[in-house]
Every structure is written in C-alpha cells, then in structure tokens.
Image (cartoon, coloured by chain):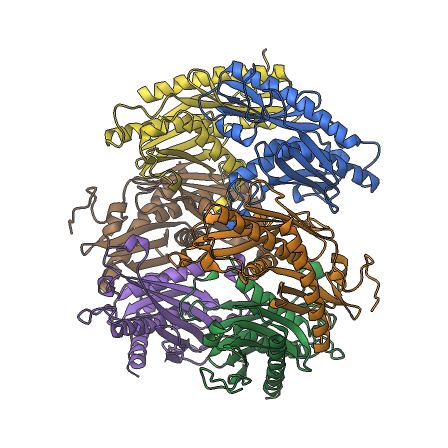
Chain colours: A blue, B yellow, C brown, D purple, E green, F orange
Amino acid sequence: MSAARVDGRKVGQLRPVTLTRKWSIHPEGSVLVEFGQTKVLCTASVTEGVPRWLRGSGKGWVTAEYAMLPRATNTRGDRESVKGKVGGRTQEISRLIGRALRAVVDTKALGENTIIVDCDVLQADGGTRTAAITGAYVALQDAVTWMRDKKMIKASREPLAGSVSAVSVGIIDGVPMLDLCYEEDVRAETDMNVVCTADGKFVEVQGTAEGAPFDRAELDALLDLAAAGCRELASHQVKALLS
Amino acid sequence: MSAARVDGRKVGQLRPVTLTRKWSIHPEGSVLVEFGQTKVLCTASVTEGVPRWLRGSGKGWVTAEYAMLPRATNTRGDRESVKGKVGGRTQEISRLIGRALRAVVDTKALGENTIIVDCDVLQADGGTRTAAITGAYVALQDAVTWMRDKKMIKASREPLAGSVSAVSVGIIDGVPMLDLCYEEDVRAETDMNVVCTADGKFVEVQGTAEGAPFDRAELDALLDLAAAGCRELASHQVKALLS
Amino acid sequence: MSAARVDGRKVGQLRPVTLTRKWSIHPEGSVLVEFGQTKVLCTASVTEGVPRWLRGSGKGWVTAEYAMLPRATNTRGDRESVKGKVGGRTQEISRLIGRALRAVVDTKALGENTIIVDCDVLQADGGTRTAAITGAYVALQDAVTWMRDKKMIKASREPLAGSVSAVSVGIIDGVPMLDLCYEEDVRAETDMNVVCTADGKFVEVQGTAEGAPFDRAELDALLDLAAAGCRELASHQVKALLS
Amino acid sequence: MSAARVDGRKVGQLRPVTLTRKWSIHPEGSVLVEFGQTKVLCTASVTEGVPRWLRGSGKGWVTAEYAMLPRATNTRGDRESVKGKVGGRTQEISRLIGRALRAVVDTKALGENTIIVDCDVLQADGGTRTAAITGAYVALQDAVTWMRDKKMIKASREPLAGSVSAVSVGIIDGVPMLDLCYEEDVRAETDMNVVCTADGKFVEVQGTAEGAPFDRAELDALLDLAAAGCRELASHQVKALLS
Amino acid sequence: MSAARVDGRKVGQLRPVTLTRKWSIHPEGSVLVEFGQTKVLCTASVTEGVPRWLRGSGKGWVTAEYAMLPRATNTRGDRESVKGKVGGRTQEISRLIGRALRAVVDTKALGENTIIVDCDVLQADGGTRTAAITGAYVALQDAVTWMRDKKMIKASREPLAGSVSAVSVGIIDGVPMLDLCYEEDVRAETDMNVVCTADGKFVEVQGTAEGAPFDRAELDALLDLAAAGCRELASHQVKALLS
Amino acid sequence: MSAARVDGRKVGQLRPVTLTRKWSIHPEGSVLVEFGQTKVLCTASVTEGVPRWLRGSGKGWVTAEYAMLPRATNTRGDRESVKGKVGGRTQEISRLIGRALRAVVDTKALGENTIIVDCDVLQADGGTRTAAITGAYVALQDAVTWMRDKKMIKASREPLAGSVSAVSVGIIDGVPMLDLCYEEDVRAETDMNVVCTADGKFVEVQGTAEGAPFDRAELDALLDLAAAGCRELASHQVKALLS
C-alpha cells in the first residue's frame, strides 16, 4: 500500500513525536507532548488525601482532566467556564485518559494520595486525546518519582505496573492509516483510538464508523496498525524518561 | 466452555428479550425494551425543522438522550436536574446512541425534520445502553413510518439504510460471555459494548480493560460473541416490527 | 346534573384507578399508579440518616421529588437536567407531594431515617400530581413495612398516622367536575387540587381561577366533589395494600 | 372570641396597612407596601413587546418576580444569585403573584406590551406574599395609567377588570385568625393564603395543614375571615389610588 | 472653575448625604445611605464561626455582597438569580467593598466571627459603590458595637482601626468634578473611585479612561477632589454614629 | 535606593521581557509573552459581525478573556469550567484587559467585526494581568494587520490609535518597586496595576492597600515607577512588531 497522505507520510508512519519534560516550573510532573502540530501540556499534580469514597481504604487515586484553549483549533470555541458547563466530548476524553492511566497504576502502592493529570491542548491538529494519554503517562511517572523522593511512597513498591500510550487510526478512501492529522480525521470513514501497554496489550479500544459500517477485516487491519504505533510511542516514552 | 453464569445462562446466550411497541400513547414511536430485568422506555419524537447549523441543507437530524430514573438502580442516585448538570456517563451514552442511530439514517431522505429518541431507564440490571440502542432503533422505525403516513417524507426514498442493535460482552474469570447482567458486569475484567448492523458490520466498538489489559485473542473472542448476539437481536427487531 | 364529559363519565366519577405494587425490583416501595391514561411510577427509597438540620433530633424525614419524562406529554418537553435547572412547576409539585405525605407521618416513630419518594410521570393525561400523591402514599406504606421487617423502626410505634390521597376538581362550562383529564383541564375556568385524609379532613386545598374568579358556592361544590373523590381513592389504597 | 394575639390585635383585625405610591423615581409604577413590620417594594416596569409565544397575538403579558433581600429575615439567607438558582419557595410565590394579577388583566386591552412587577421584600414579618400581591396591584394600576398617558393603550378599553388583594389566615391554638405575623405563622396549625377581587370573589385559595388536618368547619371560618380581610384591603387600595 | 453641573452643584460639592441607622429591625447593623437620589440599604449580619480556611486561626472575617434591585435603574435589568450567575460588575464591586472594609478591620480582635455586609441598591443615580462603602462602614460599626454588648469580642481591643468612606470623581468636558450623578457619569471622559480613611490616606484608587487617556496633572486634580470629598463623608459618618 | 530584591533586580528594573509572535498556527494574532517566569499565551481571533447591541452601528468590537491553566500556579486550582462558573477575579481581569485594549481602538475603523483576545496563563509568577495586556496588544496589532491583508478594513483608516502596555508596582518594606514577582507580590503592603499608552498617559490605575493605607507621596512614587516601566515595555512591543 502506498497511498499518498496529505503530509507525505507512509500509512503506518507516526508524525514527529516530541516529549519535553519539566516544561513548567510548578507541577510535580509536566510534559509538553507534540504529535506533529498537535501540542498538549500535561501536568501532574500531587496532593495528600483521596476523594471521600476512598478514605481509609489505604488506596490512592489518579484522575485526569482534558481541556482545549479556545483558539487551539482553527475557529475559536467558546470557553466551557463561560458556558457554565463541561461539554460531553470534554468529559468523555477526561474519563478516557483517567481510565487509561489507572490501568497501569497500583493504587495500593500510592498510599492515600491523589494525582491529577491536567491535559490542556495548546494547539490542535488531530489526535489530541491520544497525544494527551501518551504525554500524561510521562508526567505521571515524573510525579511518582517526585513522591518517592519526598518519601510519600515506599521504595519497596512500584506504583506504575507498566506504561501506556495511545494512537489514532482510521480508514480513508478504503486505506487504513496511522495517527491521523486533522485534515485526515475529517475525511476518515472509520476512526479508532487505541490505548496499549508497552507489551502490546489493549487497555481501551474505541472504534466508530463515521460513514459506512466497517467489517472485521478492516477492524483487524486497524488494530495491527495501532498496536505497532503504540510500540513506537512506548519507546519514545522510555527515551524521554531516560534523558 | 461451560462456565456457570449467575442466572444459569450459557456464555453465548442473551437474556430474554422483549420489545413492546406503542407502549405510550403520545410519541410517534415508543418501545419498552427489556433485556432480562433491564427495562428502558424508548420514545421517538418528530419535530419539523432542524438545528441551526443544518438549516437550508435539506438534511434532517436524529439525536438521542439517555437518562436513568433515580431509583432504577439498587441504590438511589441523585437527579441530574437537581444537581444542575448532566453527568459525564450520561452524556457519553447519549452521544453513543445518537451516533449508532445516525449510522443507518439517510438524513437527506428525512428532509429538514428532527427525530429525538429519548431512552429512559426504568429499571437497570446491566446493559442499559445496549438495550437502549436496540429499542431505540425500533422506535425510530415507527416514527419514520408515522412521518411517511403524514407525507413528511417522500415515499420514493427510505430514510433507514438498515437496522442497528447493540450488546455487551465481557470476560469474567477468563471466560468471554455475552450480554452481562449487573452482577456479572461488576466482576468483569474486560467490558465491551458493540453496535452492529443487521448484516454483521460494526458501527461502534468500545472495549475497556477494567482489570488487567486484554490481548488480541481475547478481543477476537469478544467480537465473535458480540457479532452473533447482535444478529439475534436484529431478528428480534424484525419480529417486533412485523407484529 | 348530567353534563356530557369527553369520556362519557358522570361529573362525580373518577377515571379507572389502578395501583400496581412492586412494579420495580429495587426500591423498598414501588407503585405504578394509573388514573385513566395518566401513569406515574412512585418509588420509595429508604436511607439511614437525615439531612444535617435534623441530626441528633431523633426524628426522621420524608420528602418527594416529582418529574416528567420528556415525552410523557403530547409535545416533547426539554429535560430539566439538560436545561440545568428544575422548573417552578416541578418544584411546586415536589413540595406539595412532600407536604402531603408528611401530614400523616410521625417523624419521631421513623427514627433518624429518610424516605425519598420519587414520582416520575411516564404518561400524562391530567391529574399527574394527584395521582402521584395517591400512589406515593402506598409506596411509602410499603417502605415503612420494609423498615419494620429490617428492625429499622420499633414495632410499638406506627409511623403513619393515616392515609392521604388527592384528586383534582374543576368547573367546566359552569359545571363542577371530578378528576379532570387533560382535555377537560385545559377548558376549566377553575381548577382545584385537594389532598384529604381517609377520614375526610383536608391536608391541602389549592384552588385557582383560570378564567373568571369563583364565588363561595362554587368553591363549596368543588370541595364536596373532592372530598367524596378522596374517600373513594382511600378505599382503592386500602384494597391495594391488602392484596 | 377574644383570644390574645402577640401584638394585642383582635382575631379578625389586620395589622396597620400602608401603601406608599411613587416610592422610587425610575419605575412606571412603584409602591412600598407595609403590613405591620413587613415591607415590600413593588415596582412595575413597562416594556414594549411580549414573550415569543405571544408575538402576533395582539395580547399583552403581565408577570411577577418575588425575592427577599438576604437580611430581610431574622437570620441571613444566602443570595439566590450566589447559589446560582432560584429556590422553590421563591418560584412558587412569583408564580402566585403573576397569576393573581393576570386574573384581573384584560391582555387584549394591553396591546403587545409587557408589565413585569418586581416584589422585593425589604423586611419580613409574615405575610410577605399577601402584602406583595396587595401592593403589586396598586403598582400595576399606576403603570397602566402611565401607559395610557403615553398612548400605549387605547382610552376606550380598560386593561384592569377589577382589583385584587390578598391576606393570610391561620388557626392558632384552635382559633382562626387574620393576617398572621411571623411569630403567629410559625405556631399556626393551618395556614392559608387567599386572593380575592374587590367584589369578594376568589382568585386563589391555598390552604395547608401544618399540623393536624383541618375539617370543613375550620376551612369555612378561615374563608370568612379572609374574605372580610380582603374587602378591607381593597378599600386601602382605593384610598391610596385616589390620594 | 465654575462649570455648570446638571444639578447646579459646584465641581467640588457632594450631593446631599443621608445616613439613616437602624433602618431595618433584624440586622445587627443597618443603614440606608443616600447620596442624592442614590439609595443603598447596607445591613451587617454577625455569625459565629469563620470560613473553613480561617478555622483555628483566632481571626474573624468581614466580607460584603453588593447587588441591585432589578428596577433600581432607569431600565429594568434581569435578576442575577434568574440568570443563574452573578455578573462581573457585581462581583467586582462586592470584592471592592469587602477589601475597603477589611482595610480598617483588626481580624484578631473580632475573634472567630464573621460579619457579612449586604449592600442592596434600592435606587441608583450614580455612585452606588461609593455610597455602599460609606454606608457599609457605619453598619459595620453598629454590628461591632452589638458584638461588644453580647460579649462576643473583648472590651480591651478595638476591631475597627479607623473609618473608610468612598467617593467618585471624574472629568467632564475637561473639568474634574466630585461625586458624579448618573447623567454626569455617562458623559465623563475619566472616571475614578477612591476609598480613603478618615485621616486622608488611600485604601483603593481605581481610575479608568472612558474616552481619551488622562495625564498626570488630571490624575492629581482628581485625587485632590476625592481626598477632600472623603474627609467630608467621614464627618457625616461620625455625626451619624454619634446621633 | 538599593533594596535587595529576591532576584537581585534593582527597584525600578523589569524582569526579562520576551514577546514571541506567531506562537500558534491557527489564530490571526498570537503572542507568547514572558515577564520572567510568568508566561501568558495571547491569541487574537477575528470574526465577522458584532454583538447584537452593536449591529447596524458600523462599529466593531474588541473584547478579552483571561484564564489560568489549573497548574499554572504553585498549588493546583480547580477549573472554572468544572466549578460551572467564572470566578470574580477572572472576570475582573478579563474586563480590565478588554477596557485597556479598547482604549486605543477606533471601533469605527474596524467595521462590524469582532476581535476576541484570549489570554491564557500557562505559568504564573506574579504580574499575569499586566503581562497579558502587554502581549494582547501585540496580538491585536497582528490581527488588525491580518484584517487589512484580507481587505476586511479600509487602508485609509488605522484602527489602533496607539499602543498600551501594563505593569505592576508595589511597596515592600516601605520601598516602591517595579514589576513584582509572586514572592514580592505576596509581601507587598500596597499593590498597583497601571496601564499606559506609549506616550505616557494613563488608561487605568488600580491601587490597593493590602496592609496599611498609603499616602499621596507613596502613590506618586508608584506612579513614577509604573510610567517608566510602561515606556520600556512599549519599546519591547515596537521591537517585537518590527522583527
């Protein structure tokens, strides 16, 4: 397959990936993640204590909040604070990121502490939720290291059981492709977001037929592409954390 | 595989399915759908005109709203009207139902008319969103027939390109199972909701690892179960619409 | 008087009344009440503890919430959860139901427990608030029995001092009539809702001139009709509770 | 009957009533009404045009909004603007005042104009809603006169078909009493608000058993007291409008 | 300078100032302040305890809330309670009044008690925020005296270190003027609100160029006028508190 | 004066100022402004049309919205979108930025077009509102140039009459200082924000006594420092716009 992509990439090729750690001075973990022109600032904030329903359980909590700056996109969107409510899409993505991160967290090992990972899209060009998950994991790892340094968690137990990353895949003009930019995303007949662990297992699979329903063969092709993409992202994460 | 299920079903067996049409006197389409103890009232309301962003396009619109009565569940939940906002889970499911229905709708054939399908859970025992989609399709079909009778749409063009139904699947103690009841849902390591057309194609696939991440073989087994379940639900829908 | 009513009833005749207990599996008390085509699901939920302002008082609390499904009526109404606030009419009726129930509750006998009675209108054809009160009392009685079985209240003290039921009355073309259906309600010059105990005393009287103001003789005629109607409803309640 | 009242009044005696017209410089009608220590500022605001659902009908609209200053009462209440929603009691009273005023308004004669009557309680000592209705009518009359002067309505047609006033009645220690102050209101077993026209007809009757249910004889006694009270208030209104 | 003002005042002349103490019967301090036609009711409410973030600090808290009745102005404004949120202007002024009062409060001397000063504009004709601050100080002083009488604060320590008052100044047709009424305020090129202590020091200075930016000489002239105006207001406050 | 500042600056010295234009790809104007560690992203969005109250006036509109990312500060703040309302501080600053920009805008020259300038604080270390104004002006200038290129405005008329910049000043341990960082801001007895045009005139002066009230001499010293600071910022703006 050699379909022409809008930016000249091959169908199974990621956009350039950048993970800039310590982008901010205040948070316990902070990463600016870039998937091509998509830029998301992921900050991990540690606080002592847990939500009411976990008090006394000995378990910690990890959650996430996703949002977009009003002019991260091509046309300006009204602020959700001004509208007075968080939109359905925003909540859906916040919940997805939180679930993805918790899939690799051993909450017992965290102790009764909470980590909130904020993912704010500074610039959007498709794949903001998958970039957010990929960056959020690195920010979370940094926050956990910070907690260990502060003796908030015991050295003997590792709170993160593995890594997670995420990527979008889609079918355009019948061709399955990896890591869609906005222009591709708009044209995709089928759109799927896949979250994987570093060892290639699935944490979340969300596929939607935007146009015609898709068959099993197409689904299989998309899953193959996504799994390979996540493996590559996982190595970017390792490299960033070692630098 | 002969795993014991809490209600004695086989792993690939649906709960008893009932689709009661014309349950209400006012709506253009209304169906009480039951998947075992789960009961959802689906009503389809037709109004002339479309949302602002579609005006003049010649296209219609189909959307859905999902909600639960406060005591549909085992413990009472606060009303979202009293809390003053619609929760993330509610919005996510409403959006899912709307997308599922629109996958089989030819909006051009609807003309500039809107159909809102309300799915109100009267009693919950797992699988409320999949029951809702399955019932909503039947209510939508009745509403379209009503519109044809009222000459709101042309006889020459069929607004519904096919049918959709949905079912949940999950892995419990390592065993993939179809159509989880609440007690099973709570214990599932992996939980997936699948929306299919009558000809076995996928409209939406949403799988989440609640416990350990799942591998490709498990994913494949769940998709097989779900596709078979949806075929069976499609025949229930046909039978109801013919009765 | 032999005025023709839209459904052939006599002026002092109730519509067919049905009280179906245990309609739902989860709540401690649940009743589907029908006044003709009006259907309201009343569920009573018991929780330990009381609102903050009653803590330590030794007294329990009974409250009610009323709502309509969006398409319970002839034209679809927007959901209050989506609008982000509970409307004036909804709050007014919720408060009325709560006051009506509390009129027969000995809160000391309940202990520091709370019962919330949810009245959700599944289908509306006039008289939804009076049907709700009539059904809510039966659901409340079942919840109290459940509490007694669970030893949450002492056998020696009866929390319900009597029963309450409610009915609407109105004047149409100068003729006072009992239990108005929607078509009659719209035409009524005067509209009154009356809540009575089984022994014919008044708990609440709410009369409104929709057209011309009414005089004392008309008011007296309406009160007579309503008191008789409530006596009949009380016997329906007894029958349901004995079945 | 010679029951001692907290302020020495007879059972059928109103508190001192004051109606101060033109209390404010801006509104088209403005009245400070005092029932003893209860003080309500009623302002009537005229605007051209009507709500959307009345456009083109040739009819006008009259509505009311009731509110309390935070420290109108003995202990400070949180502002509804700060809480972000209007409470049930506030909405109920606003709706009551609006209905009471509309009972004497010929909306055709108003033309497509709107009058909003704001009733803000500056100091509360029981009977705020009945004082509000009594003052609101006078402010409304002044606004209608203002409209006539501005040629907004035709001289040939009178928009106000009569006057309305309102008073509270209640049973304390078995004795029916007129126009309860706060201390009496708290102790009342039965509490009723009655809105009458000047010719003694009923516009609204709202009676509630706060303690034991009340019988027909008690209800009759309360209605007698209220009707007499409203006649007296009507003469206060006439006097104020002639001054 | 002898510029003609709309009401015949001299450029450095305040409008008639009235401070009526004990205007309401319920609050611990209550003052109706009038600057010409501007009327603001200031009530000070004392409650035991402090906001969460001050508990255990030994310090008290003073805060303020400002609001306007809907028809305090020439055209009716929608209620913020109905709109469901407090507007920016309202919040800004509430915060300003609170800061102004706290500038002279020794919170240690208050003990862990809270005073909320509500400033409700009954009639507006320019300068509502400055009238509010001027009246609020007097209400606050009365509340502190009440607390001393109730032994809520120790006799040995004075919670109020001084007095505050406020006035507006502005430049109209190039001429700096004191205490603008609404008609002047609308025409002003520069508008400034100044809060001073009785000894002529500044607590808050807020100047805004409504038209052309202003230079240092103009700023100096405005500050001179304002300081003199506040001195005069301080003597009105003393007189009122001694009466 | 040679007071030691926490970062070694002289009392009248600005922190390093950076203005990075075209930081984002989507907006018509976008500037990342840095005052030391404070980083604010200012984006200017152009849309055709104006708010309702300006339609048909031939005038355009410029407005601003300010917000902080949740972890821009040392401890995480809850999102205003999640809280469901915009806080008082946020609204106050948004209004300030809008007024400051409009002070140099000729709305007639804009035609009926709107420019919204979003100022999102990515990292906060004091002076976020003054940095925002300084950066917003540059983004606004770029947006105006973009409009001219698109022929949305006539070449013959310049919509920006001058430039605006802003800086904070304060008194710490009795010493007036320029451009406070967060650590200084917290310790300041008096805090003032000043907005000036390039020619040294004042657009807005907002001074607040955080501790003791300040006298005229202190106020004068602060104004001198601020005016000099703004002159320097104006030259940074010119340099950025020429680059």
C121 left or right, relative to E192: left
Q: Quadrant of the N terminus of chain E?
A: bottom right
Q: Is residue C214 visible?
A: no
Residue F70, how many percent across, how many down? 65, 47
Q: Quadrant of the C terminus of chain E?
A: bottom right
B30 left or right, relative to B8: left
* Corner quadrant of residue B198: top left
Depth order, front residue of B13/A121: A121
C131 left or right, relative to F137: left
Residue B54, how many percent across, how many down? 37, 37
* Relative height, residue A56 to residue D33 (above, below): above
Residue B141, how many percent across, how many down? 34, 26
* Corner quadrant of residue A236: top right
Depth order, front residue of A13/C242: A13
* Relative height, residue C207 to residue D221 (above, below): above
D127 left or right, relative to C145: left
